[in-house]
């Protein structure tokens, strides 16, 4: 792809690359369509009179829809200079089958991919859907419709934890001297009876 792109000055092929392994690349032989979807979400607040007010716009994940073709017998451009179009797999006679299996494994494993298109490049894309049509006339070609959605990855910032405040001792408040309750005649009689029981008086 790089050789042909350097001649024409623009991208001619669409490719999927596994994000954490740039040696695993699927390059489509041809792309029938590319649909680039970019939206934004607004935060609206109702007002008493008139239309709702919008005070904030937030970017939402971008989406991409591709319809690509991989054939068992691709037409090579300057084959003596350029290697075979990249399709992960072993047997070059089953390129179409290998391409389908490659995309399906990425989708099932939930791996992120980088996508290179004729319009722009994407990163952190997840395959959310794929469909394939084959019939008697296209038995050696696989046509795949692939839906991808951007995964927004949040970043966290680490800060030093504040030092804990030292606990202060609570000062005891002076409550003053406690006054002794005066003895009543009933208390005196009870004390006398207890003493009489002890000493037999």
Image: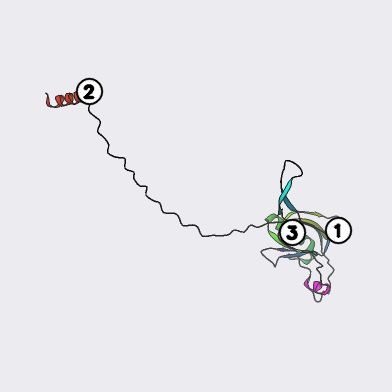
Q: Out of 109 and 118, give the one closest to the viewer.
A: 118
Q: Secondary structure at mark 2?
A: helix
Where residue 67 sits: x, y (%)? Answer: 81, 58
Does residue 151 appear to the left or right of 85 in the view shown? Answer: left
Q: Out of 59 and 152, give the one closest to the viewer.
A: 59
> Could you classify mark 2 by the number of other residues whose Cα lies within 10 Å: few (under 14), some (14-19), or many (20 or more)?
few
Q: Secondary structure at mark 1?
A: helix
**Against 27, is 128 above or below?**
above
Verify CB contact (< 8 Å) between mark 3 and mark 2. no
Location of residue 3 by image quarter:
bottom right
Residue at which label 2 appears? 186
Residue at which label 3 appears? 103
> Could you classify mark 1 by the number of other residues whose Cα lies within 10 Å: few (under 14), some (14-19), or many (20 or more)?
few
Q: Out of 141 and 186, give the one closest to the viewer.
A: 186
Where residue 146 sits: x, y (%)? Answer: 77, 56
Residue extent of the magenta highlight: 1-11
Q: Secondary structure at mark 3?
A: helix
Alpha carbon of mark 3 to alpha carbon of mark 2: how far?
100 Å
Q: Residue furthest right?
A: 137
Does residue 183 appear to the left or right of 125 in the view shown? Answer: left
Residue at which label 1 appears? 138
């Amino acid at each position: 792809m790089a050789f042909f792109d350097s001649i024409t000055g623009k991208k001619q092929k669409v490719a999927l690359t596994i994000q954490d392994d740039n040696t695993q690349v699927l390059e489509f032989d041809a792309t029938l369509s590319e649909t680039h979807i970019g939206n934004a979400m607004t935060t609206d607040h109702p007002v008493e009179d008139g239309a709702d007010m919008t005070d904030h716009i937030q970017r939402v994940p971008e989406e991409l829809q591709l319809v690509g073709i991989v054939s068992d017998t691709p037409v090579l451009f300057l084959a003596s200079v350029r290697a075979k179009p990249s399709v992960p797999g072993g047997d070059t006679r089953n390129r179409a089958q290998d391409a389908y299996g490659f995309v399906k494994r990425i989708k099932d494993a939930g791996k992120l991919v980088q996508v290179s298109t004729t319009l722009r490049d994407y990163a952190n894309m997840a395959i959310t859907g794929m469909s394939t049509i084959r019939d008697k006339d296209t038995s050696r070609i696989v046509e795949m419709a692939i839906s991808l959605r951007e995964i927004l990855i949040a970043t966290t910032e680490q800060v030093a934890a504040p030092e804990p405040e030292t606990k202060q001792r609570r000062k005891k408040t002076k409550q003053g001297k406690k006054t002794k309750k005066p003895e009543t005649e009933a208390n005196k009689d009870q004390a006398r009876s207890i003493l009489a029981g002890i000493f037999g008086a």
